[in-house]
Amino acid sequence: MSKTFELKNNQDDKAVELPVIEGSRGTPAVDVRGLAGKQGVFTYDPAFTATCSCDSDITFIDGEQGQLLYRGYSVQDLAEHSSYLEVCYLLLNGELPDKDQMETFRDAITHHTMLNQSLVKFFDGFHYDAHPMAILTGITGSLSAFYHDATDIRNPEHREIFTHRMIAKMPTIAAAAFKHSVGQPKIGPKNDLDYTSNLLRMMFAVPAEDYEVDPVAAKALDVLFILHADHEQNASTSTVRMAGSTGTNPYAAISTGIAALWGPAHGGANEAVLNMLAEIGDASQVPKYVEKAKDKEDGFRLMGFGHRVYKNFDPRATVIRGYCHQVLEHYGMQNNKLFELAMELERVALEDDYFVERKLYPNVDFYSGIIYQALGIPINMFTPMFAIARTVGWAAHWSEMMADPGMRIARPRQIYTGYDLRGYVDIDKR
């Protein structure tokens, strides 16, 4: 039975019935598309926090239950049993692959990892201390100038080639951005390595020495990438969708997502955690800063605790917490001052009634920053690592939107608060 929602216009007491849309799970939504024509009003929702901008069957978040599903599979289940590339296939295609499908997909990604040599020269045009995210944004936006053979957004085969290329090349771009920042030669990909092992080698190998990938580091990165692969209609994904709705080439659309992710309120949160730990300085100072965090008059905030969407716990954090402690133990860092401080802060937050009652548990950003630091990844590369992982989510949502025959250009409305019509006054009379 279809449901409707009755809305009255207070100006003339005129009522209108609006259809209610229900998905397979989650909060129903009132379809307001006909509201302006029937009632002469728009809806007002700053930041679109109560607005459904699309329907999607890719990812589902239940913030009350602390649940994150990719195509119906829990992220915890995938992190335990799957791999990042298998999750990429799942997000793009809707189902987990069989062995032949996985082999074909892996080969497609592996053989798209190299960059055009003319494109590699672009890196030299960036200042030596340019932020890697600035480089990622610029290089990704330029890809359409080199790979324009498959940018017909209405062609399903072109869309598939694009998604494979983007997932494959993002680690190569990010690693090259890192090498540029430290003045080292760029290291190309190797086809006999898995996805995260390849990334680690491209980042840390040098021509003068052999480099052996640490499997513990590669596995930790693989799990982190699974946890960050998609997160529904977040700011960067919504940006990709909005840019893509104009019909722009897909590389340009993805570059807008990278730019949005760069914001400290979005992809820069794990970087903010390390900056916070640096401010606290020592484990002995944790009680003092915890009290500061409780004081509403104090400007100090505990970064990496709580989440805007998850009202209970962040399911990704429960997975990565174990890997965090495993990595610290593997590298003998339990007694490292920074990590000692982080673990003390975690202990206090999990035992303090103030945080427990408000469900301000450590989130995925708290642990991911610690793991990246333990692996030797510098702070300015934290957000690029996030961008690598989230590329498949952006590509999946872009592809889903492009395949939708009802797709329209995004065009939000506004409430105008400026001047009414005014006449021009000559400059001599002002």
Image (tube, rainbow, N blue to C red):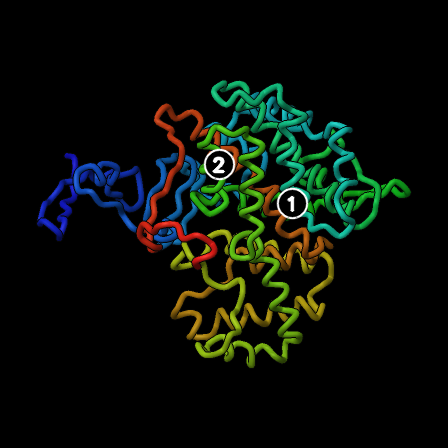
Residue type, label 1: Lys
Secondary structure state at the residue bearing disc 2: helix
Quarter of the N terminus within the rendering: top left
Residue 87 visible somewhere in the drawing: no
Task: Sort mark 2 into few (<14), some (14-19) or many (20+) by Cα contacts within 10 Å.
Answer: many
Label 2 belongs to which residue?
243
**Residue 225 occupies quadrant:** top right
Question: Left of 45 or right of it: where is 291?
Answer: right
The number of discs equals 2
Residue depicted at 52% across the width and 33% down the height: 395
Residue type, label 2: Ala
Secondary structure state at the residue bearing disc 1: helix
Question: Left of 177 or right of it: where is 95?
Answer: left
Quarter of the C terminus within the rendering: bottom left
Q: How far from the left and from the top, in percent, is residue 169?
A: 66, 33
Reply above or below: 245 against 324: above
Q: How far from the left and from the top, in percent, is residue 393?
A: 51, 38
Residue depicted at 68% across the width and 60% down the height: 329
Residue 390 visible somewhere in the drawing: yes
Q: Which mark lies nearer to you, 1 or 2? A: 2
Pick the front one: 400 or 222: 400
Q: CA distance from mark 1 to mark 2?
A: 34 Å
Label 1 belongs to which residue?
219
Residue depicted at 84% across the width and 41% down the height: 185
Question: Left of 367 or right of it: where is 16?
Answer: left
